[in-house]
Image (spheres, rainbow, N blue to C red):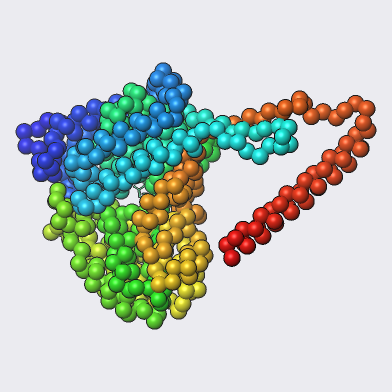
Amino acid sequence: MATDTPPTAVAAASTLSPERLAALADGAVGGDDDPIDVTAPATTERVGRVPAAAADDVARAVETVRESSAGSAWADRPARERAAVLDRFADRVTEHRAELLDLLQLETGKSRRTAAEEILEVPMACQYLVGSGPAVVGDERRGAAIPGLTTATVTYDPVGVVGVISPWNYPMTLAAADVLPALLAGNGVVLKPDEKTPYTALALAELLEAAGLPEGVLTVVTGRGETAGPALVDHVDHVAFTGSTETGRAVAARAGQNLIDCSLELGGNNPLVVLADADLETAARGAVQACFSNAGQLCLSAERLYVVESVYDAFLEAFVRETDRLTLGTAYDYDADVGSLIDAAQLDRVRSHVDDARDRGATVETGGRHRPDVAPHCFEPTVLTDVESDATVACAETFGPVVSVTPVADADAAVTAANDSPYGLNASVWCGDTARGEAVARRIDCGTVCVNDGILSGWGARDAPMGGVGDSGIGRRHGPEGIRRFLEPRTVSVSRVGPFVFPDRVPTGWIVAGSLAAASGARRVSGAVRRATRRVKRTVSD
Ligand code: NAD
């Protein structure tokens, strides 16, 4: 899209131009549907146009990736060689960070600070995958049927072609969180980014190819969710989906019909608990980060705060004060903390949740206003109190800069309130006594619970699984679990003594009785060994 006067959102970014955006769009699989206009949330201008893949285009794209992966023997390369591509990719991301920051801001409207956090994420993800990934992908010895006489080895093969469907809120991080481990595991990948944020995905693919990924092993299809999404699920061997619970259910149903596996990272309505012995200033600062990063458009964001009564007033005062310090803006500089919401629909959702709470008697402690003077879809970080437990903001995910703060009698009441949700993605507990905090954390029904931190210590623990329970999804990203979902295990068992068949001359009844007695003896011996090991461990730790 070459024009004489580029849209102001493009012109203001030092690294971008209409020509560069058009070149990125050329990297997408061509599409038969009407092209998709891409809009800059910060100005609501159309900044570019990308192809829209129809169902047939998606089917062809998957087959092409399958052929390219086979042609380049991607799966047959040693895992260390594939990891080396990710290592070089991390360097490319660092080198090209200025353009990536601009692209992220252009198509999401987020503040540059938030965009920078997102870019920093990617080399950290690569570091884990490069260091630990090859061992996860390698063969594994498991307990044999008859130790000494037989062996059991698990080998891991890539599933084939992985379909990644990614959302708009963290278009770089959340695409990378699935694409990179899928590639490391030896798969081909077709990435379908959200239609609002195609350019970051296209830049990611470009940088991977520049880092040595064979051409065609990763392809980006830009397309509308309702057309390209189901077509992708119909043709790939695993689908890794990040998005809303509603769409996740449709993806899971379709994957089930096709008998393929899926991992689903869905919504959340995440609780944050402040116990009586917490350092309240630290907790307030941490809560602000956990609630309002990316204008609250973060699946891990805290939206429901439960504070033990004895410290409720003091925490609320500190929390509101810290919230008021946040600055709003979408400029391509590091001045602002909080940027724009993604579009008018998201703004409507945020406003309606605040209005509903207000209508039911909630108090707006700070915020609560649309700020078109900052950007057309900008909304102030908002703290609500006196929120009814059945208000929309308390029960449903807002996915915006709006949180409720509620007093609770004690830690038990906080756990009960935290668990009163169909979601179970992320939670945090703030306390002085971390052992007690950890005990409380273990009672919260979420895939991740951070103690004395909101999000980053859990998300940043790359070796530990991350994901949701209940309406927040199935499967895990990060850690060995996040790689193994893209692998098909095969058990290879070898008998050193030939086949286990009943000898002809021994009566079958004797063999059955002898085998059962041997199995029961083996159970007793292994039980005794387990108990003795526990005793030794206890003695050593005492
Ligand atoms: P969404 O479900 O509408 O869209 C997500 C992706 O799915 C997009 O790429 C979209 O094009 C695609 N899609 C849409 N319809 C589809 C269909 N029928 N079949 C297949 N794919 C389809 O999500 P959204 O509402 O735009 O995104 C916000 C939601 O994502 C929030 O609920 C948020 O909590 C969730 N989210 C979760 C995580 C996580 O890691 N758990 C991370 C980010 C966002």
Identify the residue at horizontal 14%, vertical 30% (top origin).
19
Identify the residue at horizontal 69%, vertical 53% (top origin).
530
How many numbered circles are shown?
0
Q: Position of residue 171 (x, y in %)?
A: 30, 43
Q: Tell me which corner region of the image, top left, top right, bottom left or bottom right, holds residue 126.
A: top left
- Asked whether residue 293 appears in the rendered view, the answer is yes
Which of the image's four quarters has the C terminus? Answer: bottom right
Q: Position of residue 43 (x, y in %)?
A: 15, 48
Q: Position of residue 30 (x, y in %)?
A: 29, 26
Q: Tell me which corner region of the image, top left, top right, bottom left or bottom right, holds residue 385.
A: bottom left
| Residue found at the very far bottom of the displayed protein | 310
Left-right relation of 505 to 148: right
| In-front residue for pair 461/447 | 461
Left-right relation of 244 to 52: right
Identify the residue at horizontal 48%, vertical 70% (top origin).
436
Left-right relation of 498 to 136: right
- Asked whether residue 359 appears in the rendered view, the answer is no
Left-right relation of 310 to 369: right
| In-front residue for pair 537/320 | 537
